[in-house]
Image (cartoon, rainbow, N blue to C red):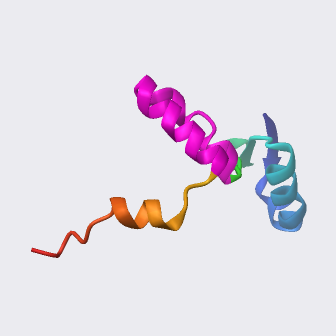
Amino acid sequence: MKIITTTELARNLRQILDRLAVDGEELVIQRNHQQIARLLPGPGRQTAFEAMADLYRTLPAVVAEDWEKDSRTGMSQDTIADSMSDPWDS
């Protein structure tokens, strides 16, 4: 954790934000030798594949097998349309 002054922050904001985003470094901001704030990196980004990679592990075994098979082969539009219903249709 690096400590910077408010003056450093004001003079080098762009570089400090770049360092925060790229290096994921946490920064403490001080004014008059007292901590007034902390800058934390935002959450990392994931692709859709990365976000969904472990989904099948949270499902029951039978459902997980079907989900994994369907995700690898792709479902046809007919299969999706047949299994969906209009929730407002009474």
Q: Which residues are magenta?
A: 48-73
Decide if residue 37 is in sight here: no
Rendered view: 75 above or below 2? below
Q: Is residue 56 magenta?
A: yes
Extreme residue toward the top, this view: 61
Q: Residue at x 85, y 56 (%)?
A: 16
User: What is the quadrant of the N terminus in the image?
Assistant: top right
Rendered view: 36 above or below 81? above
Viewer-nearest residue: 70 or 35: 70
Q: Position of residue 42 (x, y in %)?
A: 67, 51
Viewer-nearest residue: 30 or 43: 43
Residue 25: name its quadrant.
Answer: top right
Extreme residue toward the left, this view: 90
Q: Give the overall secondary structure of the magenta segment.
A: helix
Q: Residue at x 52, y 27 (%)?
A: 57
Number of numbered discs: 0
Viewer-nearest residue: 14 or 37: 14
In-image side of 87 versus 14 (left or right): left
Q: Position of residue 54 (x, y in %)?
A: 59, 33
Q: Is residue 27 magenta?
A: no
Decide if residue 88 is in sight here: yes
In-image side of 87 versus 18 (left or right): left
Q: Residue at x 49, y 32 (%)?
A: 64
Q: Position of residue 19 (x, y in %)?
A: 87, 51
User: What is the quadrant of the C terminus in the image?
Assistant: bottom left
